[in-house]
Image (tube, coloured by chain):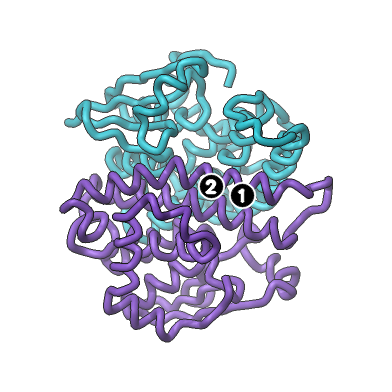
Chain colours: A cyan, B purple
Amino acid sequence: MPSYTLYYFNGRGRAEILRMIFNVAGAQFTDKRFEFNEWDKIRNDMPSSSVPVLEIDGKDKMPETMAIARYLAREYGFHGKNNMDMFRVDYICDCLYEIMHDYMRYFHEKSGRFRSGSSDKSDMAGEMQRSFMETCRRVLPFLEKTLEMRNGGSQFFMGDQMMVCDMMLYCFLENPMMENQTMFNSYPKLMALWKRVAGHPKVSGYLKKRSNTNW
Amino acid sequence: MPSYTLYYFNGRGRAEILRMIFNVAGAQFTDKRFEFNEWDKIRNDMPSSSVPVLEIDGKDKMPETMAIARYLAREYGFHGKNNMDMFRVDYICDCLYEIMHDYMRYFHEKSGRFRSGSSDKSDMAGEMQRSFMETCRRVLPFLEKTLEMRNGGSQFFMGDQMMVCDMMLYCFLENPMMENQTMFNSYPKLMALWKRVAGHPKVSGYLKKRSNTNW
């Protein structure tokens, strides 16, 4: 069994899905967190100067949130079992990633972190928020329908087993829902799934014990 | 064998990697292209109002460029053979996707297409171009090193076999290189790989016969 170290800021952000997969699988990993003011020291040690990064056996550092998530999902049985099912899990995940990616860009822009300062960006945060909301309006109705296609949407995206796409729904909508719950009222099946994931014994156990951060 | 229809604009853009995989695999598909002025009619028929979309057997329409690319790569043997190799192929692909995604956003913003018009966006294209160039500066040195790790970078990313990540390097850098070749001069191994992919018998055959569009 390889040893895993996960590098990310001391927040949920892009890394929470990875921590959740490890925890739901009952797998060991080192959760290496750092603060924003440490980033300048750390970034040069990270491939492609970004996080999350998964380090394997203390040597190979692998970047890219979604590539890491799919690797762990395959490793622990949270991905599709055949090519078509992997495709379905994958496009649900990628749809959710569109939302998370746009949200995180808006979230960091709003805070002024990582700003290059090359021009007047006074309206950039507003622009990014509009872009994030537009992505939600485009993607969520499709996901609501996709969920409904299996057992009327009363279980998980792929049926009776919770997969990486279900965990991703929880993690990627958590911050946006804290900011504006009403945006999601038009998607009752997705909201019920969100609660179903939170109530899953393995997930609820993790949610109780996890580090409490404000993003 | 399922029948495939690929929906996208009449341009290379996000769909060219999918067309290339089909062609290199020698697989049949219907290449359904439309013009920008037809988009308003078509978008409501597309899941999540976006393209590319892959339709299977005339019924299921599947969205998300990268989920489609990985499905086809697994189907035709252009993905890793075990979980760790899939992870490597995947993070290289996702790094390249970061570049392509930022480029396409800039490309469409510059043209004024798909603009919501909600605010003054006079500097948005410039901002997006800077963001795209910053992504290149962040990601490409890592990919240059990654390539070099196998056989000194003289073959393909994963060794002697061309995989989906190599084809992606070709397709995702094609438009950016047409716009500004010098940006890529600092990455000689990647540029040599770009030419190696173009010269691969299956790829060069496709490049000769493909539809000639300006993006």
- Which image quarter: residue A55? top left
Q: Which residue has dot 1 on it? A: B129
Q: In what element is the residue under mark 2?
A: helix
Q: What is the three-letter code of the residue carrying label 1? A: Gln
Evaluate if marks 2 and 1 touch, with contact meaning CB atoms under 8 Å apart: yes
Tell me which residue sits at (34%, 83%) in the image.
B205
Crowd tier of the residue under label 1, counting other residues whose Cα lies within 10 Å: few below 14, some 14–19, many 20 or above: many
- Left or right: A39, with A30 as reference point: right
Tell me which residue sits at (55%, 63%) in the image.
B179
Tell me which residue sits at (83%, 46%) in the image.
B120
Q: Quadrant of the N terminus of chain B?
A: bottom left
Expressed as whole percent of the image width and height from the top left, the position of residue A41 reads 41, 19
Cα separation between marks 2 and 1: 6 Å
Vertical comparison of A101 with A16: above or below: below
- Which image quarter: residue B165? bottom left
Expressed as whole percent of the image width and height from the top left, the position of residue B163 reads 29, 62
Q: In what element is the residue under mark 1?
A: helix
Chain letter for mark 2, please: B
Depth order, front residue of B20/A89: B20
Q: Which residue has dot 2 on it? A: B133
Tell me which residue sits at (21%, 30%) in the image.
A59
Residue B181 seen in the figure: yes
Chain letter for mark 1, please: B
Vertical comparison of B100 with B136: above or below: below
Q: What is the three-letter code of the residue carrying label 2? A: Met
Residue A80 seen in the figure: no
